[in-house]
Amino acid sequence: MIDVQHDRIPEIALEWHRAGTGAALATVIETWGSAPRPVGSQLAISGDGQIEGSVSGGCVEGAVVVEAIDALQGNGDRLMLEFGVSDDEAFAVGLACGGRIRVMVEPIGTALPEDMLASLCDARAKRSQVAYVLNTETGAQALATPPEHAARFRIDKSGFEEDGVTFVGVHNPPLRMVVVGAVHIAQPLMKMARLAGYDATLIDPREAFGAPARFPGETISNDWPDEAMRAHGLDPRVAVVTLTHDPKIDDPAIIEALKSDVFYLGSLGSTRTHAKRVARLKEQGFEDDDIARIHAPVGLDIGGRSPAEIAISIMAEITQRLRKG
């Protein structure tokens, strides 16, 4: 399942600040060697010592908290901290060897203005792609959205630009997946999607197919796909997969997806099936460029035969599209 609490680190820091306890955001801005947490990882620290999130998996959190509270009680300046992670400490958090991490600590209201953090949180609440951009030499700050830093947004990569002073902290909405058709392939695909970090929803108006007994623990909608997808919301962090072969069910989902900016749309079916699908979509007024967005037959050609193998091929193609464009 998606770690909702961990994903709310900026929001938690803002809540603590507004509650009057004071708060700071610590962000991993650079790593060398084997680092416990990737660049962009965040830790919220309140003035009374509460913490949420992580910048090191436990290696240096204590030191960061002490420095953050000192900054909150002092002049509220931005801090740049550098820590070495010993081999023993690294091994304790599951790494083979040590490294170094650089952590930026920004007290809210001084180093990081409250209104800028509030705007960042508002963008996140709307599932907008947003980045916090800081010039570490001049202190100039801004929020950026695509097409700026498009490559970073695509691969979820926070870090310094080539100038070595501009840090870009990427805040992408959590990934979501819509699977249309509660067929055998959907059973392993839903599990794989969750393992890969997607919040997955299964849609099938046929209640006998989309039944909790067949998909225990999954989010299921028995509404018609176009209605369910409009209610769900589609955006550049959503992948859509249709699996039924039935035009009455798949076509409304495909049409809804083509009207949106989902980053992936894949449809099960042979080349012949897809040719018929293309003809129907053209009758609906879709152009060749629109139809070319559909990955069909769905999945990378790895020779998969079983439902699980086909699900692997689908997840591989989705990952390729997400990370490579």
Image (tube, helix red, strand yellow):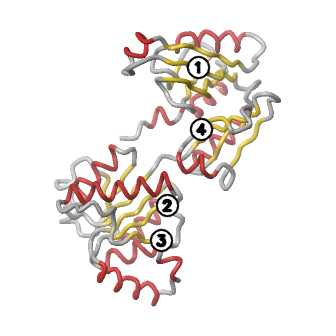
Q: Assign the N terminus to one quadrant of the image.
A: top left
Q: Which of the 4 image quarters holds residue 28? A: top right
Q: Which amino acid does label 2 sit on?
A: Phe
Task: Say which label, 2 or 3, has the lower sequence index.
Answer: 2
Residue at the spot of label 4? 158
Residue at the spot of label 3? 293
Residue at the spot of label 1? 45
Residue nearer the viewer, 85 or 212: 85
State the CA–CA distance, disc 4 to disc 2: 20 Å
Instruction: In the rendered view, tell whether residue 194 sits above or below residue 99.
Output: below
State the CA–CA distance, disc 4 to disc 3: 28 Å
Q: Do the residues labelled 1 and 3 touch (CB within 8 Å)?
A: no
Residue 95 on image: x %, y % = 39, 21
Q: Which amino acid does label 3 sit on?
A: Arg
Task: Say which label, 1 or 2, has the lower sequence index.
Answer: 1
Identify the disc placed on residue 263. Answer: 2
Task: Say which label, 4 or 2, has the lower sequence index.
Answer: 4
Residue 127 on image: x %, y % = 56, 50
Q: Which amino acid does label 1 sit on?
A: Ile
The residue at 52%/72% (across/down) is 259
Which label lies toward us, 1 or 3?
Answer: 3
